[in-house]
Amino acid sequence: MVVENLREVEKRVCEACRRAGRDRDEVTLIAVSKTKPASMIEELFAIGTRDFGENKVQELCGKYEALPKDIRWHLIGHLQRNKVKAVVDKACLIHSVDSLRLAEAISQEAQRQGRMVPVLIEVNVAGEESKFGVSPEETENLVREAAKLPGIQVQGLMTIAPFVENPEENRAVFSNLKKLYVDIKTKNIDNVAMNVLSMGMTNDYEVAIEEGATMIRVGTGIFGVR
Ligand SMILES: *Cc1c(COP(=O)(O)O)cnc(C)c1O
């Protein structure tokens, strides 16, 4: 079941890349396994999937211990400062840095553990009340401030687009984030890579790819409803 679903998503990713004139390997598909058992992850691991996404630190840590060490775990959910310590050595990328205080906590723990922690800045592009993330106007400033901290490398931007019936409604959200990303990239800020644009979920990943996503986060489309 999950293997079939993954193949279907993979096919659509390829088609979206073709439509956009992009190479398939420009887009990393993250299988969002939150709330789903290790056995399902193992099925995908067996056919070569290595990038998995979790939104809770405790669940990520539990799965990290139970599953092969060459899995790349992406922390995609909101991160509280008191959970930073548990996750900086387990996540390959933290997608959800949305404040300087959080960036500082990550920096402190990274230095303590002698690591470099790759992060994305989460942007609330649509300005939804219910969502985490900084506003587009605040983004460059947070990128600059986070980039000054030792132990952190800012690799790009992430957004969670609104829930919409028709994915076309999110096209402007994705193209606006892409513009912001290019804008910041052009400024060549020290210690900022700007190579990752994490956007697009089950309902809208094809549109996100067409608008320049380099990482898409697909849960339901692979693992079924939660
Ligand atoms: C759950 C989640 C996803 C995956 O959502 P689906 O609609 O199931 O694909 C992607 N990104 C984040 C941040 C999530 O929390």
Image (cartoon, grey):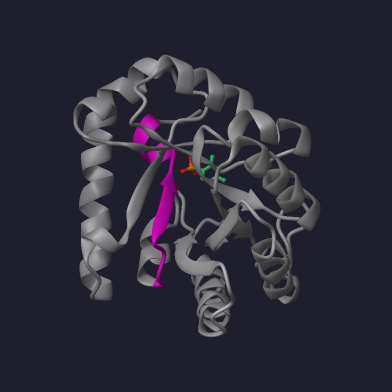
Q: Residue at x 40, y 70 (%)?
A: 212
Residue range in magenta is 211-223
Q: Residue at x 22, y 60 (%)?
A: 24
Q: Residue at x 52, y 24 (%)?
A: 35
Q: Residue at x 27, y 36 (%)?
A: 49
Q: Position of residue 70 (x, y in %)?
A: 33, 31
Asked where in the image residue 100 lies, by quadrant, the reply is bottom right
Q: Position of residue 195 (x, y in %)?
A: 44, 67
- Indicate whether residue 222 is drawn in magenta: yes
Task: Classify the position of the N terminus by image quarter.
Answer: top left
Name the side, left or right, on which 89 lies relative to 213.
right
Name the side, left or right, on which 198 lies relative to 125.
left
Asked where in the image residue 189 lies, by quadrant, the reply is bottom right
Q: Between 138 and 6, which is closer to the camera in this rendering?
A: 138
Would you place residue 163 above or below residue 168 in this image?
A: above
- Indicate whether residue 103 is drawn in magenta: no
Q: Between 187 and 171, which is closer to the camera in this rendering?
A: 187
Name the side, left or right, on which 79 lies relative to 11.
right
Q: From where the camera sits, is residue 109 visible?
A: yes
Asked where in the image residue 109 lies, by quadrant, the reply is top right
Q: From where the camera sits, is residue 56 visible?
A: no
Q: Position of residue 20 (x, y in %)?
A: 28, 74
Q: Position of residue 57 (x, y in %)?
A: 62, 29
